[in-house]
Amino acid sequence: MRIGADGRRQWRARAAALALALATGPGAGCAVEAGVHIELLLPDDPALSPVGDPLQLAEISLIATVPGEPPQRFTQRVTDGSHDVGLGRLPVGSGLRLAVELRAASQRLIGYGRAVAPVDVQADEDVTIPIVMRRPFAYVTGSAGLDAFDAAVEPGLPYAARLALPAPPRATAPTTAGDTLVAVSESALFLVSTATHAPEDVAPVPLQAGARAVAVTPDDDYAIVGHGGADGGISIVRLDDVRGETGSANFVPLGDVTAVAAARSRTPSGAPVAWALVGGAEPGAACAGAPASPRIVAVAVDNPSEPLVMIEPGEPVTDFAAHPTADAIAYVTPCNAASQVRAVAPWSDPGRVLDMQSVRGAVAVAVDDTRIWSLGVQPSTGGRGAFLVIGSVTFDGRDAAVLELPAAEERALSDDFSDEGQFAEVRMTADGLVPLDLAVFPGADHVGVLYRGYYHGDAQLLDVGLATVTVIPEMDLDAWEYLLVDASTGALVQRTRTRCDLRYDPDAFLDRWSCTQAPGQNVVTGEGYAPLQLAVLNGFR
């Protein structure tokens, strides 16, 4: 490791390029080498740095993707004190997409970064590419600040912090580079540095009221803000103008926008594409009253008044997501018997369904480079409480999987006992769950989940002579939680309750109760809140 002149910690990884032999097969081309130098830029703060305490970097991988080819991975163990790591050979060519993973000895992902633009590697020249490296943080809105959950730390260590922001954010979205988090409140857009977890020193951009969703274009040039309500639409904000203190929002009326996404250009001008779900249904809302004619609309950011594509599913839609290259759009139709997650090709035939996966109770969807992910729920049945399910499938319909999470459980504790060793506790499995949001972490090792649960406990009675005494009252509990889920096993890696509402009949022998924690469950500090939205640094949603 080396300390640069500006004080930033920098790792330097090397890879050599080989001519077209790697891309076209043995014997093709000649073995002429060039140098590709990856400069990894890390935060000063060890609490935010992927190589800061208590994290221990053990392995570094470079992932190179040649257009039309499977990704190639170059991995090297890291020894103490080293700062130059040889990673192997890269194919010569144009349009390579590069990403870097940092992992601990346990294989936990502790850092990730990617090059924003494709890289051209020539056989006779050196290339230096700076990549911003960050820990895989999840950000949850809904409180007076912004809750940040660190997925890099090992189980059992503290992982939550609340960031102070200029206004309570309703939604956030990271830039592709990972250096900035774009946040929107009800009526303003502001920038947060991921190197410091503090607001950037630029003025907030005023927005039309009703802001509720945000996305960043893959080139990091624009933020797309979604506004709800009958007078809603999208605002297009150029991020360089925000940093130059000349930021303004170009508002485009579309109607009640409930979700937004952004994709690379498919227009002659080269401008990125903004996507919006207009008239989407709310998660958990009754299908009988859900909007029946939603639209998924695409516009070019340089000419938003003329829609490029309009998809009309013809039934309620709760969520949608765009593939990073905009080759496909995925959306959820929860009000049919199958709760289908559908993928369509928006640029060739918007009405033709490419792929479907049925996930019980699915209401939220996310898309990474290769898979469609969805979040649903299995109702309580047969004595087992309700539990969440995570579905995933490739865009061509192969390798479908459904992951069952553990049954949700909450607990209430009697406050009537004060002596050590005395307590009364009620354990309740979920009668119902409402999935709220999900996001996929870089590397697809983990999935982040938001949900609301409904729990009920029956009264406990005791016969005393000729009378029956209610010892434990009937109670109902509502809880909101964030989960970090192992994407291969469904195990809960982190579990944080953001709010708990407990209601009970006080006319009982034990008449004072409060929410308590289940094993492995954390609670947020300060006032509880209902989470609104989840975003993952360098992740997908």
Image (cartoon, helix red, strand yellow):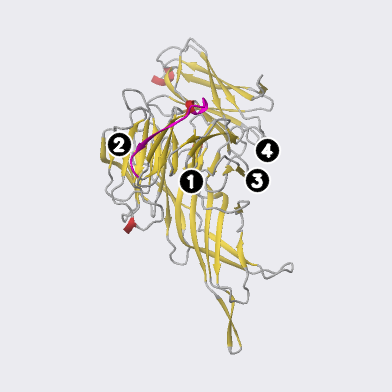
For residue 158, which numbered disc appears in the image?
A: 3
Q: Residue at (34%, 42%) from the top-left corner? A: 397
Q: Are marks 4 and 2 in contact (CB under 8 Å)?
A: no
What is the x, y in percent for residue 8? 64, 25
In front of the other: label 4 or label 1?
A: 1
Quarter holding the N terminus? Answer: top right
Instruction: Quickly name the residue at label 4.
Output: 54
Is 415 above or below relative to 257? Answer: below
**Along the viewing direction, whichever of 351 and 312 lies nearer the viewer:** 312
Q: Residue at (67%, 70%) from the top-left corner? A: 416
Instruction: Quickly name the residue at label 2.
Output: 345
Spatial CA distance of label 3 from label 4 is 11 Å
Q: Residue at (44%, 11%) from the top-left corner? A: 30
Chain-order first, disc 2 or disc 3: 3
Q: Are marks 2 and 3 in contact (CB under 8 Å)?
A: no
What is the x, y in percent for residue 478? 51, 61
Looking at the rendering, which quadrant does residue 521 occupy? bottom right
Viewed as shown, does residue 540 lie left or right of 137? left
Magenta span of residues:
242-255
Any part of residue 63 in sight: no
In front of the other: label 3 or label 1?
A: 1
Q: Secondary structure at mark 1?
A: loop
Any part of residue 453 in sight: yes
What is the x, y in percent for residue 182? 50, 35
Q: Secondary structure at mark 4?
A: loop
Q: Amino acid at mark 2?
A: Ala
Q: Are marks 4 and 1 in contact (CB under 8 Å)?
A: no
Spatial CA distance of label 4 from label 2 is 45 Å
Q: Amino acid at mark 3?
A: Pro
Instruction: Quickly name the residue at label 1.
Output: 533
